[in-house]
Amino acid sequence: MPQRNDASWNTVISGCVRAGSFLKSFELFREMREGGFDPNGFVLASILTACNRWPEVTGRGIEFHAFVLKVGLFNDVYVATSLLHFYGTHGLVCDAQRLFDEMPERNVVSWTALMVSYSKNGYPEETVLAHAVIYGFENDVSVSNAAITLFDCLERVEDAERLFYWMKGRDRISWNSMISLYSHGGMCEESLQCFSDMRYDDVRPDATTLSSLISLCASVDCV
């Protein structure tokens, strides 16, 4: 290309990461810096994704963490969450927790990344749920929904039920998450009862709700 700009660098680096050409993405990042271009949050999130997927580059991911702090992009919640994913992926749970504590902003993706970091590395999910309470996220529906989804992946039905009924507020995603959980477990009666309770709670089902129910009915004898 005769002329390159931020958008072209973003595109080619993210494309290399998606294609699994992680070493090439690092080389392009170096060329971008040498060409006088300052990487933005999008580029750094892509580079950190490469670090997540390439086990041999733990040291390089830590270097990128230092770079993120240097250029002032730690305030970008998506960059910080990508760092969180990196530490969790490489088994550095204490570092992931420390980074999470230092994040100036957190969202449901951040909480989910922390939960996954704990669960992947053999720690009880109750630890991070208790942490959510400490930070005042116990009433955050999005965080609770993420926890239900995590319990679904871990096949921990009773924990998901306990959290669901403990929630002070439930939205359509909350109900869909529970119906999906029951569907995945082939729990026909519980799934249909949850659907009935959802309607009673005046929450309107959507395509996701019906898809879970249809999949369940197709796989087991629900009628």
Image (cartoon, rainbow, N blue to C red):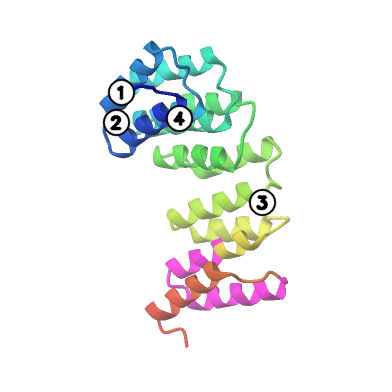
Q: Nearer the viewer, mark 1 or mark 4?
A: 4
Q: Are marks 1 and 4 in contact (CB under 8 Å)?
A: no
Q: Do the residues labelled 4 and 3 touch (CB within 8 Å)?
A: no
Point 46% across, 42% down: residue: 116
- List x then y, in percent, for residue 82: 47, 32
Q: Which mark is residue 141?
A: 3
Q: Which amino acid does label 4 sit on?
A: Ala
Q: Is mark 2 on a helix, strand or loop?
A: loop
Q: Residue 136: which quarter of the image?
A: top right
Q: Is residue 55 visible?
A: yes
What is the crowding at mark 1: few (fewer than 14 residues within 10 Å), some, or many (at least 20)? Answer: some
**Mark 2 highlights which residue?**
54
Q: Is mark 3 on a helix, strand or loop?
A: helix
Q: What element carries label 4?
A: helix
Q: Is residue 186 left or right of residue 114?
A: left
The verdict on residue 185 being magenta is yes
Span highlighted in magenta in the image: 177-202
Q: How far apart are marks 2 and 4 (CA)?
A: 25 Å
**Mark 4 highlights which residue?**
7
What is the crowding at mark 2: few (fewer than 14 residues within 10 Å), some, or many (at least 20)? Answer: some
- List x then y, in percent, for residue 204: 66, 71
Q: What residue type is labelled 2?
A: Trp
Q: Are marks 2 and 3 in contact (CB under 8 Å)?
A: no
- List x then y, in percent, for residue 111: 56, 40
Q: Is residue 138 left or right of residue 122?
A: right
The verdict on residue 58 being magenta is no
Q: How far apart are marks 3 and 1 (CA)?
A: 36 Å
Point 34% across, 22% down: residue: 2
**Mark 1 highlights which residue?**
57
* Pointer 3 or 1: first along the chain: 1
The single residue placed furthest to the front in the displayed view is 2
Q: How far apart are marks 4 and 3 (CA)?
A: 35 Å
